Image (tube, helix red, strand yellow):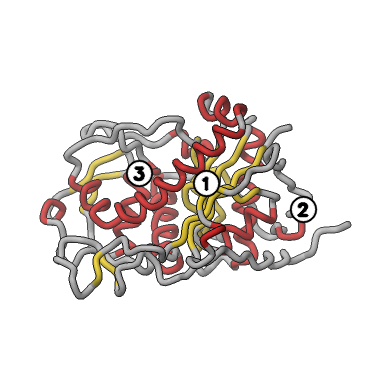
Amino acid sequence: MSQPTSPLKLPRCNYPTVDKIQQHGPYNLQKELPLVDFELARNFRSNKYTAIPLDEFDKFQTLELAHVIARSFAINEPMNRHVHPSLKIPMEISNAKHHDALGNDPFGPWTTENILFWFVRLVLLTVPSHPIGAIGINEDLLRHSLVITNEHSKPIGGSLNITLPAEEEEWRQNDPFIDAVFSYQNPVIQFIHTHEHAAIHALIAKYPDFEKALQFGKVGYIAMIARSAELPTEHTFELFAASFEQFQKQEYEYMLITGTNQWTGAACEALGAARIYFSPFRNEQRVANEIDTNQNEPYSSDGFISDKDSGLMIYALTLQR
């Protein structure tokens, strides 16, 4: 059976809603996690675009990719598009510059998009545990991440992939840029991490081999995947599937993926991943209401972390059998 000249559109993926209480929290896990199924996903893959390893790109292209991902998340990611930064800009970043392996730069505008750019740069592209005078590139991320470019070698989509850490690292203290970024991102990241930790605990309890793989650094994780308007939606799945292939070739044993929108869920299910855990966005208010905000905290129009009545779905599968 030949592959279509244009990728098929991913099937619609429906998540539970806030009132479907019985579908919240950890799911009943099957005897073993499903094996990734590339044949199942073949008709959704692209013949036009090829995903390239991030470590083949220079610093300028890497920062361009960070801007592409930040812009997409600010517009499309359900939490980041609904939650707004504080009305007041943190004073500590007003006249400061940040120096790392990617350059020496001021923070720039206090916008969701630019805050997310700095999130990508501070937390993923560079190592947040490195001391403030010697911040290096995240070599683990470079080894695993993939990029799609246009004909001019400009990044138009990317998947930032890392090894899922067995333990949380201590980040550097007194970094005004990290403090500023997390004055906005903290409710979102806390929401994600709380439920990811619960999902990982459930996986460890059910699958001893998963715990062993986690301890030995053999669990892959897609931290952020996004595209610019120049990359058609139907070709973006190529980044996703190629990321799984990349980890499989590097002899990783499992993948964990957190979906906050239906596209990610559809992409996971196209590769045969199992639903592990679900938490709704709108079961409680997690940020200030814009009427009551004190100007130093993130807020939304209604105090909820998203306006979508769906939520965060965590998936897992095995890469080896």
Observer-nearest of 109 and 188: 188
Residue occupying the point 15% across, 66% down: 295
Where is mark 1, residue-wise? 222
Horizontal side of residue 27 vs 64, given as left or right: right
User: Separation of disc 1 and disc 2 at Cα?
Assistant: 20 Å
Question: Residue at image x 66%, y 36%?
Answer: 248
Q: Relative to 87, is 181 on the left or the right? A: right
Query: Label 1's element?
Result: strand
The three-letter amino acid code for the residue at tag 2 is: Leu
- The mark found on residue 40 in the picture is 2
**Which of 313/120 is in front?**
313
Q: Quadrant of the C terminus?
A: top right
Marks 2 and 3 in Cβ contact (< 8 Å):
no
Q: Looking at the picture, how far across and down is residue 69, in whole percent?
A: 44, 58
Find residue 223 and report its horizontal and vertical position in percent.
Answer: 47, 47
Name the residue carrying label 3. 123
